[in-house]
Amino acid sequence: MRTRTLLTLAAAVAALTLPAAVPASAADTPVLTTGGVAGTPVAVGDVLTAPLAGGTTATLYSSATGTSGVSCTSSQFTATVTDNPTAPGTATESVTGHTFDSSSCTSNVVGVLGVTSISVDNLPYTTSVSSDGTLTVTPASGSAIQTTVVLRTLLGSITCVYQAPSLTGTVDNSDNSIAFTAQQFTRTSGSSLCFANGYFTAKYAPVTDAGALVYVN
C-alpha cells in the first residue's frame, strides 16, 4: 500500500512540473492555410490564383478620388508560394502572372475611343503577406512595378507606361480577398492623352489554392 501511494504521489508531482502540451496543429500553424483559419498548411510551391471579386472593377484613374480613366471587369493574378513560416509571421509569394482582359476594359477619358490592351511588365514580383493582414508587392532590385496601357484615340493608337516602386494592399479572411486602394503609379512615357498619374484600385477574391480557399493566420 505504501509503495502504491508513493508512486501515485510521484506521478502527480511529475504532472504538475511538466508544461502543458500544445496541440501540434495550433503550435505549427503557418501564415497561409486552406480550409479555414489554422487549417491545412499551404505548401511552398503551391500556386495561388484569384479573379476580380464578383461585381467589382479594377480601375486606373487619373486621381485618387476621381472617376476618369480606365476600368476593367475581368482580371486575375497568379502567384507561387515561396515561403510559409509559422504564424505570426510573413509569407512570401512570387507573382508570375497578372492579367487584364482588354475586351472587358473601357475608358471615359476625353478623346479615347477604347482600350487595346493592358499588360503588367517586369514580372515576377515578390509579394509579402503578414499575419496582421498587410500585403506588399515589390519588384526585383533595380526594377519597378510597371503597367503598359495601349489606347485607341481619335489621333490613333497611343501607349502609356506607368510605374510604381511598390504596392500595398490588405487581406480579409471574411471573403478570402486581397484589396488595393488608390495605389499611385507615375507616367514614365506616353502622350498628353496619358494622364500624369494613375491610381490603381481593385479587389481580388477569392484567393484559392487548387480550388481551396486560402486564409491568413
Image: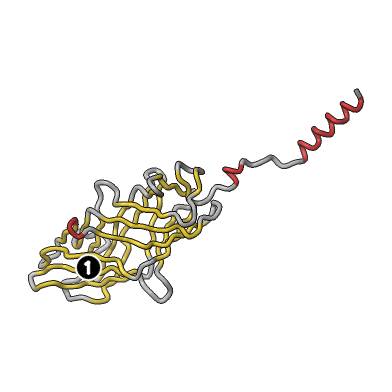
| Location of residue 157 (image quadrant) | bottom left
User: Looking at the image, is 168 positioned above or below residue 195?
Assistant: above
* Residue 184 horizontal/vertical position (percent): 31, 66
Who is closer to the viewer here, 21 or 195? 21
The residue positioned farthest toward the left in the image shown:
154
Q: Is 112 on the left or on the right of 185, as rendered?
A: left
Residue drawn at 27 percent across, 71 percent down: 162
Residue drawn at 27 percent across, 76 percent down: 188
The residue positioned farthest toward the right in the image shown:
2
Q: How many marks?
A: 1
Tell me the kind of residue under disc 1.
Answer: Val
* Residue 181 horizontal/vertical position (percent): 32, 57
Who is closer to the viewer here, 195 or 137? 137
| Location of residue 190 (image quadrant) | bottom left
Q: Mark 1 highlights which residue?
A: 149
* Residue 66 horizontal/vertical position (percent): 22, 60
Residue drawn at 58 percent across, 48 percent down: 28
Colour pattern of the rendering: secondary structure
User: Looking at the image, is 160 positioned above or below residue 15?
Assistant: below
Q: Is 205 on the left or on the right of 39, as rendered?
A: left
Who is closer to the viewer here, 139 or 195? 139
Q: Is 177 on the left or on the right of 54, as rendered?
A: right
* Residue 118 horizontal/vertical position (percent): 23, 64
- Disc 1 element: strand
Residue drawn at 24 percent across, 64 percent down: 63
What quarter of the picture does the N terminus occupy? top right
Neighbour tally class for label 1: few under 14, some 14-19, many 20 plus, Cα within 10 Å: many
